Amino acid sequence: MTLPDATADRATSALVEALELQHSQLSAVLTALADAEDSVVTGASPGSWFGPAERAQALAVRGLARIIDEAKTAVERALGDTSSALWEVRSRG
Amino acid sequence: MADDLVVSTSGSTIGVASTDLIGAAHELTRVQNDLDVLGPRLGGITIGLPPAALNAAAAPPGVYAAAREIDLAVGLLARASNDCGTIRTGLKLAASAYTMAEIAKKEAIEAIAAQIGYGLGFLLPQITGTLAIPTVVAGTTITVVSGGPDKAVKNLQDWLTENNEVITDPAFCDLLRLAQKSLDDLIAGGAHLPPAAAVAIGDEGTDLAGDDLAPGLIVLGGGALGLFNEGKVSVEQTGTSTVKAPATGLAERIARIPKTDENGGSQIRIDTIRHSDGTLTYEVYISGTQDFNLKNTTTPFDMTSNMRMIGHLPAGSMEAAREALRQAGVEPGDSVIFVGHSQGALLAHELAASGDFDVKGVVEVGAPISGSTLPTGANGVSIAHTDDLVTALGVDRPTDPNQILVERQAFANKKVPHDEAVPAHNRDRYLETAAMADASARGDLTTARKAMDAASDDAVSITSTTYKAVREKKER
């Protein structure tokens, strides 16, 4: 079935609008995630490697930072996908 | 210990905790809170168009791929939040384990010191007689060697100033604490009590003898030499002024403790806070020891009061503080925050523990001992430098389950000055530590600070009055 041009145009405009909003929301979350990762690395890491507790703490905090980094990477990919989709829709003219 | 704070409460499972471990745990709480907000926020990010609309717009694959990545990130954030909680629990357990190890080590050392003390006490009376022991400890050596109490104090002050590096060392302070703690064993040995009985009544057992036994006997022994005798005390108002704002936090309160060497000798300041409903509450600031002479002096804030209070005997400075409270119109049951330095801290603690007042807060800096227990909910905070000779006389810290202990080495990695006696005991150095404690994010410390500040939330006016206490030299 072929949609009338006007309907397709309205749907495309709505999609562009939704993708732009999603892009901006994801960018804000990405910034907040980077802050959280920084807090973990600088604020929760041990000040020294003196005792066994500090060594265990260092390993645990490193693992936590890696998970947050993976989440950040996933959001970055979502941002990339959103940008690609935006570019593709806009390039249809 | 480095130049950082160690905060502890004897009532909590975490007895001693380095700021590193507890600070990291606190930071993880903050991160977890952030993640718990970010996860749902990320999960709420969708393209927001129904499938039909997406079909109509011929949505490219990136739209669907982004949704999958967002789902993945949401799952990872939930896992990270959970890990924050697990790691935080581990950090607190680690801090607790460190505490238990420290306590076990301390108890082992004290047990050995007690046995040595008992043995010495058992043998010494053969030469000196049991009751001579406290006298020897308190007076005779100083008096005979130095030629009288007055000169002895001067010599002692000179010696303390010349040997600041030695006395401003946490190891020396620990040694002093241990020596004081073993005095009861020395006396028990001197009285030829069976070893089991000495342990039973000593601080390793029921503590029937108490940490005030030795100071009490020293006062009695000193009395024979004309030392530590009380006299009549009178108190007069020396000034009244209006204060613009109530004190907030620990450092501001400590800064309000009178400096007797700058204000003509007024030892007590009482701020009367009038609230919007007309009720009155009070903040009482008490200074430390003014005169270190072993004989009683014209100020009740001297060594006589110090020794008598440690021995739980009537003391002139306590009489002075109670009289100032009476003159300020403070009545039993009134709401009061007590703040004190050194001997003033001891007075603040004892007044708060007396049960006579509705205690809203107690801030002690450089307190020599704290044998009494503060009332529940007193918001007690005691700040002690580990290299302060005077706080080493505090025996076991904290002894009070209703008090938070903040410790710091004042001269960690710093040059100890040679122009002042016992520099780590200086009130202004305690101000530095108090400012660090104010900046600390530790929960129980923050709660105590906020509770004290809240006591003057709706203040409409504050009147500050200073008092000077004088002791008649004539002995009773």
Image (tube, coloured by chain):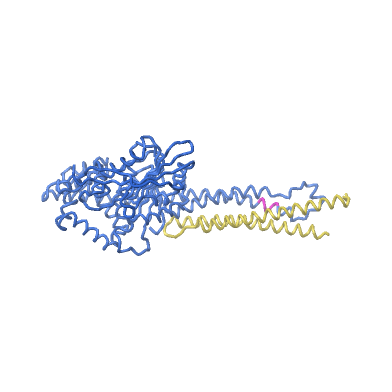
Residue B386, x across and y down, in percent: 34, 55
The residue at the point 52 percent across, 51 percent down is B28
Q: Residue furthest left?
A: B127
Q: Is residue A73 above or below residue B226?
A: below
In magenta stretch: residue A21? no
Residue B312, x across and y down, in percent: 26, 42
The picture's colour for chain A is: yellow
Q: Main secondary structure of the magenta part?
A: helix
Q: Is residue A29 above or below residue B231?
A: below
Q: Is residue B349 left or right of residue A87?
A: left
Residue A93, x across and y down, in percent: 83, 59
Count the labels in the image: 0
The picture's colour for chain B is: blue
Whether residue B449 can be seen here: yes
Q: Is residue B334 left or right of residue B294?
A: right
State the residue in front, B27 or B132.
B132
Q: Is residue B124 left or right of residue A91?
A: left
Which part of the image, by quadrant, shows the N terminus of chain B? bottom left
Residue B25, x across and y down, in percent: 49, 51
Whether residue B9 can be seen here: no
* Residue segment shown in magenta: B67-71
Which part of the image, by quadrant, shows the C terminus of chain B? top left
Instruction: Name which quarter of the figure residue B196 lies in.
Output: top left
